[in-house]
Image (cartoon, rainbow, N blue to C red):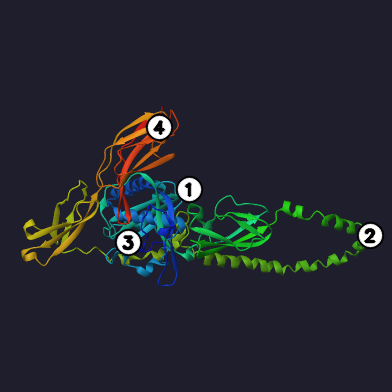
């Protein structure tokens, strides 16, 4: 388990494209090289919603207010969960210490706000929402975020699955970062671009026993702490990573970092990002197996036995065995003082253990809640407490709308302090209020309120798509839907699983389409079909929720 730290991170833009031409190399002010690496994860929104419901149900039972779900905090939490698949810890992959930016929130769009304070709980390897809540609640270092009633009100939950490993992130904030949402749902495969310093990509040490042995899996970077593999595999994006074999006489390395042993000894290879930026060197120790040793020493063995045969006469010196009195000199064995010195070693080991414990506050959040208890003293980043939201003198509130092809003017409510202001005391102007994305409403005071002004943002959301019908054909299905405006295209998803938990296929279609024929699928098999629309807004892809599912059985 991890101790709490102030969450201040600069995250990468979410992209669905994986082209390596979009991945730059840059240098931070501290001189460390920063690269952008993609990672494709399964984002589990259904699990996030389940955790959110468990969290608020327990808060309500305890007489506490419920947390509010924030759309940008949700996206931030999913980004953090994807980042933890590469390096599990509270540290950013760009910034080595969040505490160095305490009191400042930097979102992935580069916007700064000194009035927003955030914290996070993280966990790895837990199967479901209830288990995650239980582990965090039973940890003194994590429970405060679940039960807080003074500092935080808004939250986002990130849950992703990567190569069978699941990451959980709870992010809480004292103020809204985006727009409030009621719920989330579904599960989707998404590729996120994560900015990271080169130093976080460790090579590690690999030991292989046997000649002509080939590793089965592509190369995975070692954990930065040296505690094992990070899980991030270069095989997911083979064009991004290349390998240079430094010891061709010892090993061979293929294009995915898989090793084939050739001779015993110390080998190594170097991993490069986009062919130029050196990431790390991997040490490979090749050892001979017993079978290899037998195969390499057939001829010397008979020669040794031949020379040994004539020298059997020396066995006659067994007459020296009567001179066993020297064995009485085993008295020195009584001087087992050396063993006493060995007894002192465990004390040294204990000291080493004590030194090692505090150096791993980043140990997997799931296992050692006890370690987080030792870090408990550091959990006093309650300088967050004085950071109570400051009530604005002039507050503007509005509502989100759904795209209809027209310029929209959502209703506005204005407060001066706690007093609701009459409409005659202010004017309203709208901007970017037609197309899908973020609209703005600007309010200027009139009369005795002329010195006041304020603004608020609202979402022009995509209109949800509904399926008209799904018809069966021989080894094919035909899907029909009602076209919606304002989108960039549609995603039709079908699966043999009712909950879309396995055997999922996705078809991407342009905005002008209203039907699709899915061919070459097994006959007499039941399929579940759903649809949603999407649009790229700035550097982010917006999706509607999935439509209601229709089922069909192929002929």
Sooner in the amino-acid sequence: mark 3 or mark 1: 3
Could you say which quadrant of the image residue 13 lies in?
Answer: bottom left
Mark 3 vs mark 1, CA separation in Å: 29 Å
Mark 4 vs mark 3, CA separation in Å: 45 Å
In the picture, the quarter occupied by the N terminus is: bottom left
Residue 484 visible: yes
Sooner in the amino-acid sequence: mark 2 or mark 4: 2
Task: Name the disc covering residue 218, or none.
Answer: none
Q: Image check: 519 left or right of 209?
A: left
Q: Which residue is mark 2?
A: 313
Q: Which residue is mark 3?
A: 107
Q: Image check: 276 left or right of 109?
A: right
**Disc nearest the viewer among 2 and 1:** 1
**Disc nearest the viewer among 4 and 1:** 4
Mark 2 vs mark 3, CA separation in Å: 85 Å
Q: Which residue is mark 4?
A: 476
Q: Which residue is mark 1?
A: 164
């Amino acid at each position: 388990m991890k101790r709490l730290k102030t969450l201040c991170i600069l995250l990468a833009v979410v992209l669905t494209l994986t082209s390596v031409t979009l991945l730059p190399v840059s240098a931070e002010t501290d001189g460390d090289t920063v690269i952008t690496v993609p990672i494709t994860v399964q984002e589990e929104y259904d699990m996030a919603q389940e955790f959110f419901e468990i969290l608020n149900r327990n808060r309500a039972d305890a007489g506490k207010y419920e947390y509010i779900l924030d759309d940008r905090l949700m996206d931030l939490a999913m980004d953090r969960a994807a980042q933890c698949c590469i390096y599990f810890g509270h540290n950013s992959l760009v910034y080595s210490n969040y505490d160095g930016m305490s009191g400042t929130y930097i979102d992935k769009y580069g916007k700064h706000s000194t009035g927003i304070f955030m914290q996070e709980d993280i966990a790895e390897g837990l199967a479901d929402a209830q288990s995650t809540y239980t582990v965090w609640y039973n940890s003194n270092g994590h429970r405060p975020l679940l039960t807080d009633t003074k500092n935080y009100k808004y939250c986002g939950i990130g849950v992703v699955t990567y190569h069978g490993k699941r990451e959980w992130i709870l992010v809480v904030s004292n103020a809204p970062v985006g727009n409030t949402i009621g719920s989330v749902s579904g599960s989707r495969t998404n590729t996120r671009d994560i900015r990271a310093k080169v130093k976080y990509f460790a090579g590690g040490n690999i030991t292989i026993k046997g000649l002509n042995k080939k590793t089965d899996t592509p190369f995975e970077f070692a954990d930065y702490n040296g505690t094992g593999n990070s899980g991030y595999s270069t095989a997911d994006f083979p064009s991004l990573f290349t390998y240079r074999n430094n010891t061709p006489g010892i090993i061979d390395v293929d294009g995915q970092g898989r090793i084939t042993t050739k001779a015993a000894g110390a080998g190594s290879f170097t991993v490069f990002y986009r062919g130029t930026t050196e990431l790390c060197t991997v040490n490979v120790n090749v050892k001979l197996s017993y079978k290899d040793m037998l195969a390499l020493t057939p001829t010397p063995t008979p020669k040794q036995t031949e020379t040994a045969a004539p020298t059997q006469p020396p066995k006659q010196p067994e007459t020296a065995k009567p001179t066993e009195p020297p064995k009485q000199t085993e008295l020195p064995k009584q001087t087992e003082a050396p063993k006493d010195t060995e007894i002192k070693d465990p004390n040294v080991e204990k000291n080493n253990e004590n030194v090692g414990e505090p150096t791993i506050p980043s140990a997997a959040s799931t296992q050692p809640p006890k370690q987080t208890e030792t870090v408990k003293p550091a959990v006093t980043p309650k300088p967050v407490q004085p950071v109570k939201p400051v009530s604005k003198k002039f507050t503007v509130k509005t509502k989100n709308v759904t795209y209809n092809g027209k310029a929209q003017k959502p209703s506005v409510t204005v407060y001066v302090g706690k007093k609701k202001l009459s409409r005659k005391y202010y004017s309203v102007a709208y901007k970017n209020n037609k197309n899908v994305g973020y609209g703005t409403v600007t309010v200027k005071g009139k009369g005795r309120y002329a010195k006041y002004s304020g603004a608020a943002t609202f979402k022009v959301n995509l209109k949800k798509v509904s399926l008209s019908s799904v018809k069966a054909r021989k080894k094919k299905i035909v899907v029909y839907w009602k076209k919606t405006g304002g989108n960039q295209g549609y995603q039709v998803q079908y699966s043999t699983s009712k909950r879309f938990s396995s055997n999922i296929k996705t078809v991407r279609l342009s905005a002008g389409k209203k039907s699709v024929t899915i061919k070459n699928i097994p006959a007499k098999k039941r399929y579940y079909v759903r649809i949603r629309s999407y649009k790229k807004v700035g550097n982010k892809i917006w999706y509607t929720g999935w439509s209601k599912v229709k089922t069909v059985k192929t002929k």
